């Protein structure tokens, strides 16, 4: 099984004569777009997705069930279909699109649109993974801290977050990969400026597989280290 999982990397290493430095100007801009847009999306997801994940982990009832269903819908919707639906909401002729355009924010084929697409790709994955991390934290520890005089906010930052850090690290790792690797939604509402997945698709159509190996290698280089580091760090953390 390990050999099977390693085969794609072997294909990259033995994929003919190519130079990692053979990146075109459009490839470089795609890298910048993905890194900047992905970092912005992950930051927003962590800030707003973490409270939502904690709410889902600690609340039971119809309202939380509806909230969880709303989190699941973007994840279960095919990416291309989701992109089309987002275009119908945030497009220039749509009410939401017109509203944002009036405040100088265009949400189709702009860097902001790239961040929006990455948010829809990464947020559900982060929230569900982070929720599982919070579920693993014993509620009794939080109750003890409350009886000692800590506020709910202090309990969250001093007790809950440290105990959930392994799972949250995994959630951030998956979020980073989804934000940088989202293709279907980005293809519909943020074709320009192209991120790395869209640029790879365009280059394959125009130049062939052999010509895109430098960008593929760069894509892996900027995508894999963060989740690998977070995952390995989580393994070293005390139980």
Image (cartoon, rainbow, N blue to C red):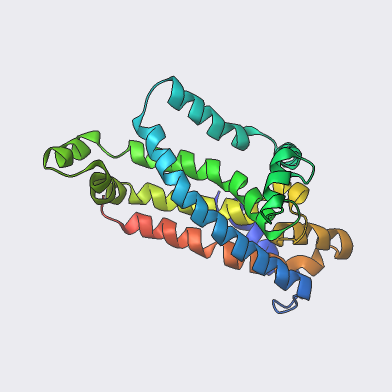
Q: In which quarter of the image is residue 200?
A: bottom right
Q: Which residue appears at 55% of the width and 48% of the height? A: 1
For residue 62, side relative to residue 117 (left or right): left
Closest to the observer, 59 or 215: 59
Q: Is residue 82 above or below residue 221?
A: above
Q: Quadrant of residue 16?
A: bottom right
Q: Which residue appears at 62% of the width and 33% of the height? A: 76
Closest to the observer, 65 or 217: 65
Q: In this view, does 34 lie above or below 16?
A: above
Q: Which residue appears at 50% of the width and 56% of the height? A: 43
Closest to the observer, 108 or 230: 108
Q: In this view, does 136 lie above or below 198?
A: above
For residue 76, side relative to residue 208 (left or right): left
For residue 178, side relative to residue 88 (left or right): left
Q: Quadrant of residue 206?
A: bottom right
Find residue 223 and report its horizontal and vertical position in percent: 58, 62
Residue lying furthest left in this view?
148
Closest to the observer, 197 or 82: 82
For residue 69, side relative to residue 166 (left or right): right
Find residue 186 and report its horizontal and vertical position in percent: 71, 50
């Amino acid at each position: 099984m390990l050999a099977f999982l390693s085969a794609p990397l072997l294909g990259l290493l033995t994929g003919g004569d190519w130079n990692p430095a053979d990146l075109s100007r459009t490839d470089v801009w795609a890298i910048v777009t993905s890194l900047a847009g992905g970092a912005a999306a992950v930051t927003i997801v962590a800030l707003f997705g973490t409270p939502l994940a904690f709410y889902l982990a600690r609340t039971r009832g119809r309202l939380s069930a509806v909230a969880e269903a709303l989190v699941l819908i973007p994840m279960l919707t095919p990416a291309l279909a989701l992109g089309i639906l987002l275009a119908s909401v945030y497009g220039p002729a749509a009410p939401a699109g017109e509203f944002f355009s009036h405040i100088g924010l265009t949400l189709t084929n702009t860097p902001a649109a790239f961040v929006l697409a990455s948010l829809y790709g990464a947020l559900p994955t982060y929230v569900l993974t982070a929720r599982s991390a919070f579920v693993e934290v014993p509620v009794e520890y939080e109750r003890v801290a409350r009886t000692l005089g800590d506020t709910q906010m202090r309990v969250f930052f001093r007790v809950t977050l440290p105990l959930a850090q392994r799972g949250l690290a995994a959630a951030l790792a998956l979020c980073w990969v989804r934000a940088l690797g989202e293709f279907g939604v980005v293809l519909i509402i943020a074709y320009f400026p192209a991120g790395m997945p869209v640029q790879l698709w365009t280059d394959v159509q125009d130049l062939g597989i052999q010509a895109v190996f430098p960008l593929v290698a760069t894509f892996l280089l900027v995508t894999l280290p963060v989740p690998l580091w977070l995952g390995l760090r989580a393994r070293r953390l005390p139980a």
